[in-house]
Amino acid sequence: MNIQDIIAKKRDKQELSKEEIEYFITNYTNGNILDYQAAALVMAIYLNGMTETETTNLTLAMAHSGDILDLSELGIVVDKHSTGGIGDKVTLILAPIIASFGVPVAKMSGRGLGYTGGTIDKLESIPGYKTNLSVEQFIKNVKENGICVMGQTLNLDPADKKIYALRDSISATESIPLISSSIMSKKIAAGANKIVLDVTCGSGAFMKNIDEAINLAQMMKKIGTLANKETICIITNMEEPLGKAVGNYLEVIEALEFLKGNMNEDVKQVILELGAYMLKLAKKGDDINVNKQNILESVKSGKAYQKFKLWIKSQGGDISYLENKENCQRAKYIIEVKADTQGYVTSLDARKVGEISMRLGAGRIKKEDIIDQTVGVILEKKIGDKVQENDVLAYIYANDEKIGNDEAKALKEVYEIKQEIVNAKNNILKII
Ligand code: URA
């Protein structure tokens, strides 16, 4: 077997065998297959797709490219993963909520790449927070505190680490077989028994329309079933960013405010839906509406917030820094973006907002870029909101005045303000 023949087969739209897929994954992970050869195969997969059998074989080969974590001593572990988005602070909020019900949260999260954010970068904006733990420490934290969220530093799914970075560098991210295998191989390797997937859909997501999102969701659910991991997919709206904040530290603060009871409506919808299904899978209640009420109660009573503090502290994070806004790090320049006209916000393209935040320094253009924790965007007006002339639409948080002013102009262009009234979209599009 050799990689040239495998590339040629996929280039010619033929189905790869299990052995060929395993050969590729093993030899790319150990360095025998070179990046340019892998890039050619990945692009051929991107262009010509894969059958369900190929996608499943790819997922399993990737999952077994490194260690498989055994979390059986923790009981039912329900994992959650998002296909990526802008302003997506869901894990920061949901993890302590779920843990407050006594459901163990043992989660590995990723970093942002390109215009999408990543939970680990957000958590690292809290001084002292450690994302790099040993397996023993990870499990010990879950046992002691019911919650631990770390980065992908262990030898779990090394094939995904290489393929994901490669896909990003050759514009091959938006592909159903590649996304399904990337996400499901990580979930299998990370040892959870049950999985809730947030499949984002819209301009700021990899799936731009509902049909594509449904196909992706169905594929991941099938793989979950085959791997004996009950999987529920919730398709959520990513036409505009989620919530108000886009940018690492700004999103941590929005998450904190949510846990104190100050919830933005769109974030609330997503948290309640995902959370209610996570509780159902964890056998904490079969009735989704009752579960939602219980989640609201956990926030109202302060239990979820207490869990958040315990979690952050147990991983070395400085809680006083979060509790006292005076201590907070701040960007040097906070620039208002004002409306020139009155009307209603009819569009606020999530991807464009993500790109603005990235250019301010909140995301990486290249994998090795160091991100700026304090910069980003606060959106005061979202789709459906009424706007008067001179109202503040948004704030740009920048550490470079010129970049800040340029991006403030760019953000103004992203806001479409018209005379017609549009309703904000329901954020939950479908459950699969
Ligand atoms: N998240 C992942 O982990 N992988 C993808 O391919 C897309 C989103």
Image (cartoon, rainbow, N blue to C red):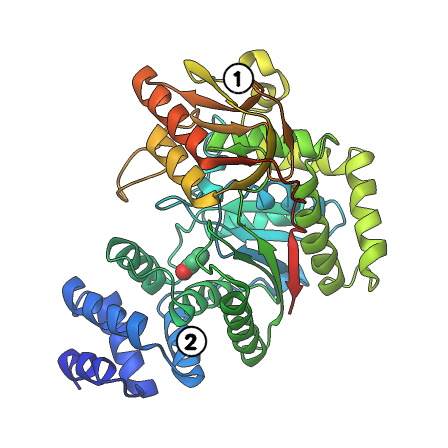
What residue do we see at 13% from left, 80% from top?
A: 4
Q: Is residue 424 above or below residue 224?
A: above
For the C terminus, the quadrant is bottom right
Disc nearest the viewer among 1 and 2: 1
Q: Which mark is residue 328?
A: 1
Residue hosting label 2: 60
Q: Is residue 289 above or below residue 118?
A: below
Give the amino acid type for the residue marked by disc 1 in the picture: Cys
Q: Quadrant of residue 31?
A: bottom left
Location of ligand 1 given as a quarter of the image: bottom left
Provide residue 140's location: percent of width, then percent of height: 58, 48
Closest to the observer: 174 or 7?
Answer: 174
Give the amino acid type for the residue marked by disc 2 in the picture: Leu
Provide residue 93's location: percent of width, then percent of height: 64, 41
Q: Quadrant of residue 80?
A: bottom right
Closest to the observer: 369 or 346?
Answer: 346
Q: Around disc 2, counting alpha carbons within 10 Å, would you say few (fewer than 14), some (14 to 19), or many (20 or more)?
A: many
Q: Is residue 230 in view from this perspective?
A: yes
